[in-house]
Amino acid sequence: MTTTLPSDHGVTVRYWAGARAATGVASDVVGGSTVADVVAAAVALHPALEPVAAVATFLVDGSASPPDRTVPAGATVEVLPPFAGG
């Protein structure tokens, strides 16, 4: 896991499926006050994440969230790329 901030001051970003493949890690701890800020910080760490993030769904503490949602310190943002299956 790549950590950029202490977990009590940052936001944990968990990567799933293609997002994990793009980053090469399961999670990071980054800063940011909105979903968009957190995603931008994750993309700054892992530029290959950018095309995946452009089509992904984001969960904040388990709830689907738009880019402008406020993310409190200590929250978890999950990056869920679209995937096929049934």
Image (cartoon, grey):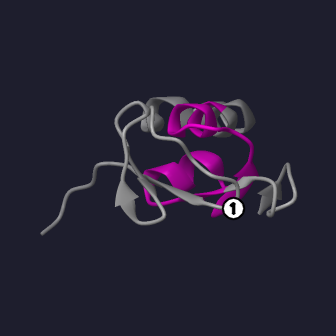
Task: Indicate whether 64 appears above or below 54.
Answer: below
Where in the figure is residue 44, as x and y percent of width and height? Answer: 71, 30
Question: Residue 39 versus residue 55: which sits nearer the camera?
Answer: 39
Tally of marks: 1
Q: Image quadrant of residue 62?
A: bottom left
Where in the figure is residue 66, as x and y percent of width and height? Answer: 37, 38
Task: Indicate whether 39 appears above or below 63.
Answer: above
As drawn, is 29 to the left or to the right of 78? right
Question: Residue 77 versus residue 73: which sits nearer the camera?
Answer: 73
Residue type (three-letter) at the residue carrying disc 1: Gly
Q: Where does label 1 land, which residue?
A: 74
Outermost left residue: 86
Quadrant of the rendering where the N terminus is positioned: bottom right
- Residue at 48% x, 64% y is 61
Where in the figure is residue 24, as x and y percent of width and height? Answer: 66, 54
Where in the figure is residue 16, as x and y percent of width and height? Answer: 47, 60
- Residue at 37% x, 47% y is 65
Quadrant of the rendering where the C terminus is positioned: bottom left
| Number of residues whose C-alpha sits closer than 10 Å to that of mark 1, classed few (under 14), some (14–19) or many (20 or more) | some
Q: Image quadrant of residue 41?
A: top right
Q: Is residue 25 visible?
A: no
As drawn, is 50 to the left or to the right of 80? right
As drawn, is 64 to the left or to the right of 14? left
Q: Is residue 53 visible?
A: yes
Task: Indicate whether 34 appears above or below 17.
Answer: above
Task: Indicate whether 19 appears above or below 26.
Answer: above
On whether residue 84 falls in the magenta region, the answer is no
- Name the element at disc 1: loop
- Residue at 80% x, 56% y is 2
Question: Residue 53 versus residue 35: which sits nearer the camera?
Answer: 35
Q: Which residues are magenta?
A: 12-40
